[in-house]
Amino acid sequence: MNGLRESKKAATKELIAECAVKITLSEGIDKLTVARITADANVSPRTFHNYFPTRDSALRWYLDTHLEVLKERVVEHVHREESILTAFESIIIEGLKSDPYSPDSLLSLYHLARIMENVELGSVTKLWSDKLADGLNKVEPMTDLSEFECYTIVNLAAEAGLKATGYQYPHQPKESVVKNVRWTFDLLRNGVDATFHT
């Protein structure tokens, strides 16, 4: 019974936070209020405050939780003997081929982070950095790379992937975004000179 209760609580927390993210991404953070979130989630304000003290805390929890999932996926891919670049590219392409505009997609998380950075002034950048650092600690022993080499590739792959998916968001069709991502990772693998010479 306790397990069922905990599962229900976790689902409610996820629903509330997801509603907050959807409003923020579609209408802007200025439209985000506790009243609006609770209406969309069909819960009471009291229920909201059982999980989150503020609207921004719901957004941050969602971002933190889903970045953790993405980090673990990178580790799993590298564990399957993929390179770090291939791991990031595969995860991004998988996400784009399902629903690039779902709240938990890399594209949505990227734009949520950009919105929140204007609100929290630096703390979101630190969140990204902390997740990357933790992922780095798990990935490095699986490679033949030095700590510096692993750090550099992880950061380049993450930043390049985010820039490629975020280019002209949300006006690019899915096929164009996938093409941009593949081109970007080819550039990382082959270098600028090789990419621009036939």
Image (spheres, helix red, strand yellow):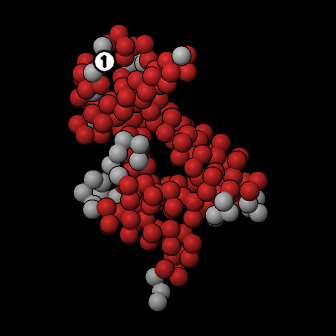
The single residue placed furthest to the front in the displayed view is 1
- The picture places residue 55, in percent across and down from the top left corner, at 36, 23
- The picture places residue 25, in percent across and down from the top left corner, at 30, 39
- The picture places residue 62, in percent across and down from the top left corner, at 44, 33
Amino acid type at image mark 1: Val
Tell me if mark 1 has few (under 14), some (14-19) or many (20+) residues whose alpha carbon lies within 10 angstroms of its own. Answer: some
For residue 54, side relative to residue 170 (left or right): right
Q: Quadrant of residue 147?
A: bottom right
Residue placed at 71% from the left, 46% from the top? Answer: 137
The single residue placed furthest to the top in the displayed view is 46
Identify the residue under disc 1.
Answer: 43
In front here: 50 or 177?
50
For residue 50, side relative to residue 70 (left or right): left
Residue placed at 32% from the left, 67% from the top? Answer: 176
Is 184 situated above or below 126?
A: below
In front here: 2 or 192?
2
- Count of numbered circles on the image: 1
Residue placed at 41% from the left, 47% from the top? Answer: 105
Is 140 situated above or below 180?
A: above
Q: Quadrant of residue 15?
A: top left
In front here: 22 or 148?
22
- The picture places residue 126, in percent across and down from the top left corner, at 55, 37
Residue placed at 54% from the left, 16% from the top? Answer: 1
Q: Is residue 74 visible?
A: yes
User: What kind of element bears circle 1?
Assistant: loop
Q: Is residue 152 visible?
A: no
For residue 48, side relative to residue 88 (left or right): left
